[in-house]
Image: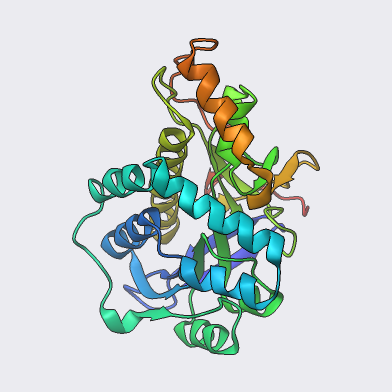
Amino acid sequence: MNLIRRNGNEWHAGPAAPGERLRVAVLCSDDPHHTYLVSRLARELDLVGVVVEPGAAQQRRLWARRAWVDAVARAYQVRRQRLTGRSAYRRRYFAALTAGVTPPAERVRRVDWINSAAATAHLEQLRPDVTVVCGTTYLRSATIAAGGLMINIHGGHLPHYKGNHCVFFAFLRKDYQRIGASLHLVAAKLDGGDLLEVVHPEIRPQDNDEHLYDRSVHLAIDRLVEILTALEGGQAALRTVVQEDAGETFRHRSRKPHLDLWAWLRIRSGLERVPHIPRGHEPVRCLAPLGDRQDEPR
């Protein structure tokens, strides 16, 4: 399928031959929400291939690079998730949503590094129109160039929360209006590409940051499937907006044990009650009617 870029920030899809579909690839890790993402795309679209960079491989690469602080911080976060029951909760949450639809085994390739020559060559062979990214390490320019229109699912409210643990830090700061997940184009700058949409989950008084993260990513995956289906069907054009130069970037090392303790204590002790906030409306809507085109280049 042909994807035509117009006016700098608008994409239109059209079949090069009758019945041709949008070719979709995925670059992801191996968490439960990545399994759900692959399952949804396999069920609804033409998923031509999946490249998986397992979390264990990401951890090994940090040790191999002697990035000691980042390696220790990431290892701590993995163990914290297990010990607090958050890993088990995430597995249950997405297991209940994931259908039994998976791509054939030959379409799934596991790699030690998402930017390896083998991974890039495989992505080039897949010839995707759209590549969906979720949970990988930082992508280099050669990988980005091989992926066609590349869309990242980011667990945080852009442009205000970039990097890792963004829902946690919004929750910690009581910044409830900025709890959500974002769909954006992949760019050289971390989480800095043009925005498609930001989705906001319902927030309930019993919620913690894990509940809100899972619900946010779930909404973002479902919304992305809707967007790609509409684009493939020629129902609308895909339009993006430039991110504001704002916000902060968080890393695994930013989430220190005392912050988790404080987030837990203030709720447990009754010092704060999480408000009930209905699901919010997206501040950006990326599907534009085909008759509503921007005529001026960006």
Q: Is residue 142 above or below residue 136?
A: below
**Residue 268 place in picture, x, y as percent:** 46, 18
Camera sees residue 248: yes
Q: Is residue 140 above or below residue 182?
A: below
**Residue 92 place in picture, x, y as percent:** 27, 45
Q: Quadrant of residue 220?
A: top left
Count of picture labels: 0
Q: Quadrant of residue 197?
A: top right
Q: Does 154 sit left or right of 19 as displayed? A: right
Q: Is residue 206 or residue 240 the one in the foreground?
A: 206
Q: Residue at 28%, 72% (x, y): give it.
A: 103
Q: Quadrant of the N terminus?
A: bottom left
**Residue 203 place in picture, x, y as percent:** 44, 23
Q: Does 69 sit left or right of 260 as displayed? A: right
Q: Is residue 88 or residue 242 the one in the foreground?
A: 88
Q: Is residue 276 above or below residue 264?
A: above
Camera sees residue 185: no
Q: Residue at 60%, 75% (x, y): give it.
A: 61
Q: Does 214 sit left or right of 101 as displayed? A: right
Q: Is residue 130 or residue 102 the one in the foreground?
A: 102
**Residue 163 place in picture, x, y as percent:** 65, 50
Q: Residue at 55%, 59% (x, y): give it.
A: 151
